[in-house]
């Protein structure tokens, strides 16, 4: 039986850093070659990073991607890596430039994969199915491909046929994987840029298993890793056999070179020509024999994270990569002793180390004693750089001139904290300002514009308040499991939430209890349910009307809000696009 050692390189590219990403591919090829692999693959659009958004409109960007691909092929051979087949995603412009609606002439911008071998770009594949929902905009940028190259790999103990597909191609029933099965391939390689969402990894595994069974061939799935603005790619690359049996699986949220030895069915005698589904091109290349495995640690089925552990890792990696890829080394945030700022501080400390997290307590005359003591306790537990900047004097000075009362006075405190103190510290010391509004608050507009909502990145933007509490408990328990100090003071978790902008203020003065609120928000925001559906789900009509009205009216605030990592089925931002000027009312 032909034997092929396959390496999947789960790596973290930087959008736009085409030369840097090519270096990552080269390095992966070196390591895969050292591990005796015959073929190594990296993720979708790897050379450009994903999603490259409107950079894809520039010819200069397309030219750079294509030139780097050719250079990479040459560099691989120059380094003695010509004998390993390297599959990478990149951006191509095929034939005459026809950006805009696909005119069917077959040219234009392509979401592409290339196979590099012996210093050459041996074949190219253009993605057939362009996702255009949720966070994906691929119809905006690419024209779809309609050909399926089948690559015959000449292995010492027999030939095998390989097909390459790109991400959404695999999600489509009757797509190129089906065609590959009809063509009798012996291995399907799927390269992906599939962002994290809760419970998605289970779905991916099932999908890979289903497609492998349909194709009657093993399927190797490689995903990219890392944070890219609002998206987090979790990796979770895997290999299943032709029966859907899991053979190898990489870690979630970590770089890895996953290596697996496959005993493949030999290639059928040549079946040339067109399949019913699509045009098939065939080509052949020779690969060397598979040496004995050198490092058994590379072949493994990595343990899964728990549901909460997965979300925590997504938030940490999303923040870490935003900081790193945007040239920051430290962050600053206001510490109120409440749960939102506490969890954000803990996420930041996990992302970049506590010494790089500046937490500032900014008491006013309305601040409770526990707001300061809980903030100090948090800072001590985590070991972050803690500062106290009393702002009561600033509030008085401005109010002495302007005489703000009521809401204006409430918001003034939040603005002095966010826009003046935190942004000032950012300007003078170079920290990125973290904002701390959870998804429930963002939904309801329960934050001060240019106040506590001020900041460059919001790690909990897509985290409902009830999830904030659950994750905080999980993180503390995790610390106990590791024999460490739980980072978040118990009091921050258990006390009733309050903005402390006026005497005795509680969130529940303005918002329904969070359990109720979050259940309605899951339906209205994540599920796009209308009022009737929400009532049918058993929610209280008066509360539904109040929530729906507040969510609709706060769209203008969300448009101005900082980005943050998507973890749910529908995050605010590019995933949920609604008009600010909007005459449609769900509520009565
Ligand atoms: N459609 C629209 N398009 C563009 N701008 C629009 C607008 N509608 C109002 N605006 C502007 O927005 C302003 C109102 O927004 P804003 O100034 O923020 O004020 P607003 O939303 O009225 O008040 C903030 C609320 O959030 C609470 N809060 C603040 C801080 C922290 C927390 C917490 O617990 O985390 C809670 C606070 O107690 C208060 O109830 C208007 O004065 C107007 O200038
Ligand atoms: N006294 C304070 N000192 C420093 N920052 C503050 C203070 N009060 C509020 N902030 C900042 O404003 C944000 C919003 O305030 P808010 O009180 O809603 O949040 P929280 O206290 O973290 O959580 P909770 O809503 O559970 O009380 C805080 O997360 C914090 O970053
Ligand atoms: N890049 C893509 O084609 C991603 C779409 C796909 N359904 C996923 O999220 O996995």
Image: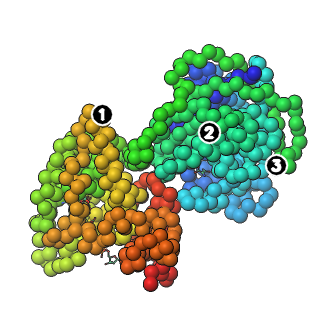
Marks 3 and 1, how far apart at CA: 54 Å
Marks 2 and 3, how far apart at CA: 22 Å
Does mark 3's beta carbon lie closer than 8 Å to ligand 3?
no
Residue 257 in the figure: left or right of residue 106: left
Does mark 1's beta carbon lie closer than 8 Å to ligand 2?
no
Who comes first in sequence, dot 3 or dot 1?
A: 3
Residue 430 in the figure: left or right of residue 108: left
What x and y, as percent, mark residue 342?
Answer: 26, 52
Q: Which mark is residue 221?
A: 2
Residue 349 in the figure: left or right of residue 194: left
| Secondary structure state at the residue bearing disc 1 | loop
Which residue is painted at 52% across and 34% down in the image? 250
| Secondary structure state at the residue bearing disc 3 | loop
Q: Nearer the viewer, mark 1 or mark 2?
A: 1
Marks 1 and 2, how far apart at CA: 32 Å
Which residue is painted at 19% across and 53% down in the image? 491
Who comes first in sequence, dot 1 or dot 2?
A: 2
Who comes first in sequence, dot 2 or dot 3?
A: 2
Q: Would you name the residue on which mark 3 appears?
A: 278
Query: Which of the 4 image quarters holds residue 2?
Result: top right
Q: Would you name the residue on which mark 1 appears?
A: 482
Q: Report the quarter where the N terminus lies.
A: top right
| Secondary structure state at the residue bearing disc 2 | strand
What x and y, as percent, mark residue 324?
Answer: 40, 43
Query: Which of the 4 image quarters holds residue 183?
Result: top right
């Amino acid at each position: 039986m032909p034997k092929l050692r396959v390496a999947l390189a789960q790596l973290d590219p930087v959008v736009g850093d085409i030369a840097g990403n090519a270096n990552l591919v080269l390095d992966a090829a070196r390591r895969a070659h050292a591990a005796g692999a015959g073929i190594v693959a990296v993720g979708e659009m790897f050379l450009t990073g994903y999603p490259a958004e409107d950079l894809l409109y520039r010819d200069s960007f397309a030219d750079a991607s294509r030139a780097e691909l050719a250079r990479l092929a040459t560099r691989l051979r120059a380094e003695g890596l010509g004998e390993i087949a390297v599959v990478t995603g990149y951006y191509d412009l095929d034939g005459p430039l026809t950006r805009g609606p696909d005119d069917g002439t077959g040219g234009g911008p392509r979401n592409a994969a290339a196979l590099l071998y012996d210093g050459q770009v041996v074949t190219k594949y253009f993605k057939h199915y362009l996702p255009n929902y949720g966070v994906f905009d691929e119809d905006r940028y690419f024209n779809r491909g309609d050909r399926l190259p089948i690559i015959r790999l000449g292995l010492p103990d027999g030939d095998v046929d390989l097909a390459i597909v790109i991400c959404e191609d695999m999600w489509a029933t009757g797509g190129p994987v089906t065609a590959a099965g009809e063509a009798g391939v012996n291995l399907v390689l799927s390269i992906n840029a599939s962002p994290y969402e809760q419970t998605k990894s289970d779905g991916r595994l099932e999908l890979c298993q289903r497609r492998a069974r349909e194709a009657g061939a093993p399927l190797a799935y490689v995903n990219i890793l890392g944070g890219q603005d609002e998206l987090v790619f979790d990796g979770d690359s895997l290999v299943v056999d032709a029966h859907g049996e899991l053979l190898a699986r990489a870690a979630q949220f970590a770089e890895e070179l996953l290596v697996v030895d496959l005993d493949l069915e030999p290639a059928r005698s040549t079946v040339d020509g067109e399949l019913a589904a699509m045009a098939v091109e065939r080509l052949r290349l020779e690969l060397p024999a598979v040496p004995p495995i050198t490092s058994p640690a590379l072949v493994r089925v990595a343990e899964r994270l728990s549901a909460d552990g997965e979300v925590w890792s997504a938030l940490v990696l999303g923040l870490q990569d935003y900081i790193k890829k945007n040239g920051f080394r430290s962050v600053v945030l206001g510490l109120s002793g409440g749960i939102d700022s506490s969890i954000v501080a803990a996420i930041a400390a996990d992302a970049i180390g506590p010494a790089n997290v500046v937490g500032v307590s900014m008491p006013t005359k309305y601040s409770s004693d526990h707001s300061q003591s809980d903030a100090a306790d948090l800072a001590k537990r985590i070991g972050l750089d803690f500062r106290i900047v009393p702002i009561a004097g600033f509030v008085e000075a401005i109010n002495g001139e302007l005489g703000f009362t009521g809401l204006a006075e409430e918001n003034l405190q939040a603005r002095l904290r966010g826009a003046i103190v935190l942004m000032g510290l950012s300007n003078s010391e170079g920290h990125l300002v973290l904002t701390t509004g959870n998804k429930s608050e963002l939904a309801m507009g329960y934050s001060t514009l240019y106040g506590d909502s001020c900041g460059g990145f919001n790690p909990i933007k897509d985290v409902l308040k009830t999830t904030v509490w659950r994750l905080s408990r999980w993180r503390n328990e995790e610390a106990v499991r590791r024999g460490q100090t739980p980072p978040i003071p118990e009091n921050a978790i258990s006390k009733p939430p309050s903005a402390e902008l006026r005497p005795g203020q509680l969130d529940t003065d303005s918002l329904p209890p969070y359990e109720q609120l979050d259940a309605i928000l899951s339906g209205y925001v994540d599920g796009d349910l209308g009022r009737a559906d929400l009532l049918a789900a058993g929610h209280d009509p008066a509360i539904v009307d109040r929530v729906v009205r507040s969510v609709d009216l706060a769209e203008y605030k969300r448009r101005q809000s900082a980005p943050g990592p998507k973890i749910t089925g529908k995050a605010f931002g590019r995933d949920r696009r609604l008009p600010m000027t909007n005459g449609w009312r769900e509520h009565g």
